[in-house]
Image (tube, grey):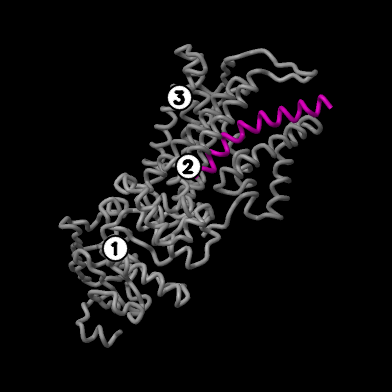
Amino acid sequence: MTQIVEILLSGITQGAVYCVVAVGLSLVYGASRILNFAHGSLYSLGGFLAWFLVVGHFNLPLWLAVLVAIPILAAAGIGIERLIIRPLRGSANWKINTIMVTLGLAFIVENGLQLVFGPGTKTIPPFTEGVLEIGGITLSWYRIWIFAISLGLVAALEYFLSATRYGQAVRAVSQDMQGANQVGVNVNQVFSLTFALSVVLTGIAGILLAPVFLVSPLGGWAPFLKAFVIVVLGGLGSTKGAFVAAFILAILEAFVIFYIGPSWAMPAWLVMLIAVLMIRPKGLFGVWEN
Amino acid sequence: MLEVNGVNAFYSDFHVLHDASLRVNKGELVAVAGANGHGKSTLLKTICGLVPAKSGQITFDGQDIAGRKAPHLVGRGLVYVAEDRRLFPDMTVLENLQLGAYLPEARRREKDNLDRVFSLYPRLAERRGQLCRSLSGGEAQMVALGRGLMSNPSLLAIDEPSLGLAPNLTETMLRTVSQLNREGLTVLLVEQSLALLEGMIDRVYSIEEGVVTEADSRSLQEAL
C-alpha cells in the first residue's frame, strides 16, 4: 500500500511540472492557433539559463536565477512572436508555415545552445535537500517545492485568465478574433503576451527540473512530445484540459515505470491518447472551433 | 459626424465597394439597404476598420480615420455590431458585456452603461451568469447590441440586426435601436428590408453591386 501511495505521489508531483509545460503550449494554441514546435527547445533554454546564472558564471541562488530568467524568457517569447510568427500571419497556409518555422527555430535554439554551452550535459544543485517521511512514505523536499511552485504558477495563470480584464481579452481572442477586435482588443498584443507567458512557463519548468534531470541541448524534445500528447488529450487550446490530462498521464507514467519499465511510459501514454480520442475526438475538454 | 467619400474596398482581387460615399449627421438614424452580397456588411466593416479601404476618405468627428484599425476606432466612439454577433461563446453574458468596456474610455462609464443595458434588457440581467453558447438567437442579439453599448459609442454601426430573428423579436430589436436613437445615439444601420424601418429612419442609402446611392424621399416611400 505504501508503495502505491509513493508511486501516486511521484506521479502527482511530476504531473504538476508537466502541467506547466503543457499549459504554456496550450495557451499559445488557444489564442493564436499556432503549434509551437520550439516549445521544448525553450524549455532547454530555461535549463541552460539557470545553469549559466547558478553554476556557470554568477553563482546566484536558484530562486534568484528564476526571477532573473523571467524577463529574459518573456523577451524571448515576444521577440519570437514579433519577428518570426507575426510576419507569417495572414499569408496563405500560415498554420503549416508557422509549424515549419517553429520547427526550424527549435533546431536553431538547440544548435545555438550547443555552440555556446557545448554538447555535454549540465546539472545544477537543488535549492533544498532532504526528504519528508510520513508513515513510511518518503518524498524529497525539492519535489514538494517543485509541486508547490508549479501549482502556484498554474493557479496564477488561471486567475489571470479568469479574473483580470487582460486575461478575459486573451480568452476573447481565442474564442472570436474579430469579436475581440470589435471591442477594442489589440489582437497582436494578445499574441505577444501569450507567447511571452508560454515561454516563461516552459522556461521555468526547465529551470525547476534542471536539478532533477540533466540539462542538455537536445533535452527539450521529450518534454515537448509529452506536452503535445497532454495538450491533445486535454483538448487543443484548453488550459483546463491540459491541467487534468497532465495529472492523468503523469500518474499513469509513474505506475508504468514502476511495474513495467521506463521505456513503456510513452507507449502507455499513446495508447491512452488513442483510446480517449476514439471516444472523444476533440480531447477531454476540447470544443469544436466555430 | 461621419463622412465617407469615394471609398473602394476589396476582398483579395474582388472589388466590393466602388467609390462609396455617405454621410451621417450627429443624432441621425441612417439606413443602408440592399440585397445580400451587394456589399452592405463590407461597407460597415470598412468604415469601422475591420476591412481596409484601398482608397477614399473616411472622416469621423472631423478626423481622417481611413486606414485606422477597429480597436483605435472603438476608443473614439465608432462601434460596430456584427450581423453574426461575434460573441465569445464560452464566456458568460456578463463577461461578454464587460469586454464591451475593455478600453479605458469605456471602462470609466462601465457601471452606468451596464445598468442601462440591464434596464433595456432585464432578461440579460437574469442570465448574466449563463454562457453565451447556450443563448437563443434573440438573446444573443441582445448581448451583441448590449456589448456595443458598453463600448460607450457616439456612433453605433449595426449590421442587419434582424438576421435570423423571428418577426416579433426583430420588431422589438429595432424598437430598441429607435429608442436609443431618440435618446441621442447616432446610428448607422444596415438592413435588407426597409419595410421594417418605417418611421424610424432619417435618411436612407441603397447599395447595389457595391455602388452606394442616397435615396430621395419619394423612392424611399416607394421602398417602404
Could you tell me if residue A186 is visible in this image?
no
Question: How far separated are the C-alphas under marks 2 and 1?
Answer: 34 Å
What chain does mark 2 sit on?
A
Residue bounds of the magenta highlight: A1-28
Tag 3: amino acid: Ala
Q: Which residue position holds label 1?
A: B46
Residue B171 appears left or right of A18 = left
Does A161 sit above or below residue B2? above
Residue A140 in the image: state x and y as whole percent.
Answer: 68, 18
What chain does mark 1 sit on?
B
Q: Which residue position holds label 2?
A: A102
Does A119 sit above or below residue A171? above
Tell me if mark 2 has few (under 14), some (14-19) or many (20+) residues whose alpha carbon lies within 10 angstroms of its own: many
Dot placed on the residue nearer the N-terminal end, 2 or 3: 3
Q: Which residue position holds label 3?
A: A69
The stretch drawn in magenta includes residue A62: no
Q: Quadrant of the N terminus of chain A?
A: top right
- Observer-nearest of A186 and A123: A186
Check if mark 2 and mark 1 are on a common chain.
Answer: no
The stretch drawn in magenta includes residue A16: yes
Residue A192 appears left or right of B137 = left
Residue B69 position by quadrant: bottom left
